[in-house]
Amino acid sequence: MTDHIRWGILGAAKFAEQHMAPAIHLARRGKLAGLATSSPQKAAPFKALAPDLQVFESYDALLSSPDIDAVYIPLPNHLHVEWAVKALEAGKHVLVEKPLAMEASGFDPVIAARDASGKLAAEAYMIVHHPQWQKARALYQEGAIGKLIRVSGAFSYDNRSDTDNIRNRPDTGGGAVPDIGVYIYGSTRFVTGEEPQKILSAEVQRENGVDVWTHITAQFPSFHYTGVVSMRMAPWQEMVFHGDGGVMKLTAPFNAGVYGEARVVLQSADLVETVYRFPSDNHYVHQVEAFNASVLDGAAYPCPLEFSRGTQEMIDMVWAAEQE
């Protein structure tokens, strides 16, 4: 192993092109070294970013290369488990897009392959690497809002016109909850350290077999939760943590810098407001740097697979409640 991580990407996904390839390129102690695609046209923007990028004509060819240390997997949701396991068995570290699996049990073969290989494997749950979420968790743990009573989360966008989008297709693991429910559910677990006890209600609207609007209420050990996600509403995102001693709000919690400036707004019980601003942090870069540090230095990774599995367990609870 050198003093940096040589990254390969399976597939020339648009998200990889726009976000993760630049993040890998910019991250300290990392290098964008390989891309698996049979399309020279799709490879072109990646080559423009990293001119010495090695292009492989197949996923297996990239996985068998001794010049690749870690693999980023941005494939459609239903392929994540299969290729994460293959990459681990090939001796590569793995960062795989969320949701890693379509149900909690899908995490188990990846965890087993991780443990057998001794390599790092993680779901690309980038938000926990952003300092706004680390600040929010610290404020909560310090008692800044007192006893927590209520958490509400919302995340929406409108992609109804993009009928071929994998999020609108059941065969590729589409749906609003798998795509963005992981954020409003997982971030709640990250800040509070609590797990849901019961889904109290689940209202789900489906089109073509995928959920396009889902509203839930849930009971956690010490607070009540309400959350809505949609692929058929105007863009919006917000998380609110409401206690008896104050309110904490994150205004651009999931697409910081794209949706808007990341801010944590803390309002005390006497209506004094304190705003913590994070105008320039890129959570994708922070995520890759944390991954590199974990591989190279043995640092604890902030978002292990076991945490991500817990979020999928909550999603599984939502689907079960929908059928009741």
Image: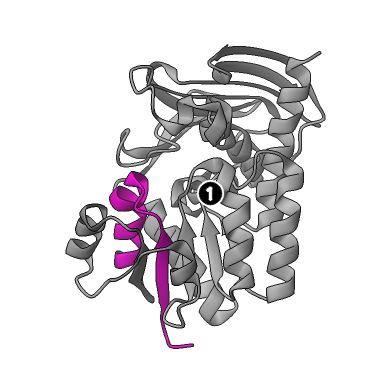
| Position of 27 relative to 266 (above/below) | below
Which corner quadrant of the image does residue 240 belong to? top right
Name the residue beneath numbered marker 1.
Answer: 125
User: Residue 288, percent across and down?
Assistant: 44, 63
Pick whichever, 207 or 134, lies toward us: 207
Q: What range is drawn magenta here? A: 1-25
Query: Residue drawn 51% across and 32% down?
Result: 180
User: Residue 46, percent across and down?
Assistant: 25, 60
Of the 4 image quadrants, the one containing the C terminus is: top right
Amino acid at circle 1: Tyr
Query: Residue drawn 34% across and 23% down?
Result: 162
Pick whichever, 260 or 108, lies toward us: 108
- Colour scheme in use: one colour
User: Residue 136, percent across and down?
Assistant: 53, 43
Query: Residue drawn 20% across and 58% down?
Result: 44
| Position of 54 relative to 272 (above/below) | below
Query: Residue drawn 65% across and 46% down?
Result: 141
Farthest residue to the bottom: give it: 2
Q: Residues within 10 Å of mark 1 (few under 14, many from 20)?
A: many
Pick whichever, 18 or 63, lies toward us: 63
State whether residue 173 appears in this view.
Answer: yes
Which corner quadrant of the image does residue 244 belong to? top right
| Position of 69 relative to 154 (above/below) | below
Pick whichever, 308 or 42, lies toward us: 42
User: Residue 102, percent across and down?
Assistant: 65, 39
**8 within the magenta span:** yes
Left or right of 225 in this view: 65: left
Which corner quadrant of the image does residue 32 belong to? bottom left
Asked which secondary structure carries label 1, the reply is loop
Left or right of 306 in this view: 165: left
